[in-house]
Image (cartoon, rainbow, N blue to C red):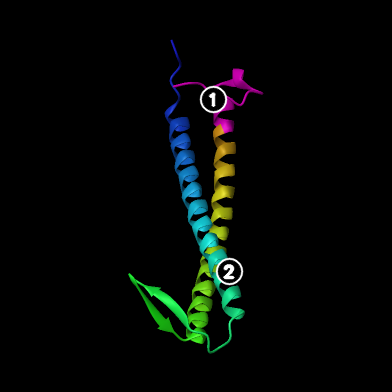
Amino acid sequence: MAEKIPPEVQTQLIKLQQLQKQLDNLTYERSVIDSELREINKILEELSKLTTDTSVYKIVGNILVKKDKTAIEQELNDRKEILELRSRTYLKQESLLRKQFEDLQKNVNDLLQRYYPQLKGSSNPPKA
């Protein structure tokens, strides 16, 4: 008959799973932001090649609206600044979560070693 995992270990494993999910979500969000930043940088690069009097259009809903090149550049630079700040914030949060995850993972391994000394040297926890 299979041994039951102690409640203390189960609780820690649930926390570990939650942290992993938070990390995954944060990593995904940061990748979306980084993708948008790359797109903005590419657009700004292309805009820099145009003269000031060149007609530039912006998509608004389902229509194109003629806008001043300088105004569009300013909008993009503002958006870029906000995204860079969010990206840095997410990076810091991700770093903190990774540290928490590693600490909790060590704690879970220590608990497993205490409850299952026969697992010493093995990285596979018992099956529930």
Q: Residue at point 61% right, 74% down?
A: 45
What secondary structure is found at the residue carrying circle 2? Answer: helix
**Residue 113 position in % (x across, y down):** 59, 26
**Residue 63 position in % (x across, y down):** 34, 73
Q: Residue furthest right?
A: 121
Determine whether label 1 and label 2 are within 8 Å by CB: no
Above or below residue 102? Residue 75 is below
Look at the image and say whether residue 120 sits in the magenta stretch. yes
Q: Residues within 10 Å of mark 2 (few under 14, many from 20)?
A: few
**Residue 1 position in % (x across, y down):** 43, 10
Q: Is residue 52 left or right of residue 128?
A: right
Q: Nearer the viewer, residue 80 or 111?
A: 80
Asked where in the image residue 108 lies, by quadrant, the reply is: top right
**Residue 64 position in % (x across, y down):** 38, 76
Q: Residue at point 45% right, 32% down?
A: 8
Q: Is residue 80 left or right of residue 128?
A: right
Q: Residues within 10 Å of mark 1 (few under 14, many from 20)?
A: few
**Label 1 or label 2, whichever comes before in sequence order:** 2
Q: Which residues are magenta?
A: 109-128
Badge number at residue 42: 2
Q: Residue at point 41% right, 82% down?
A: 66
Q: CA distance from mark 1 to mark 2?
A: 48 Å
Q: Which quadrant of the rendered structure holds the C terminus? A: top left
Q: Which amino acid type corresponds to the residue marked 1 in the rendered image?
A: Pro
The residue that label 1 is drawn on is: 125
Look at the image and say whether residue 32 sits in the magenta stretch. no
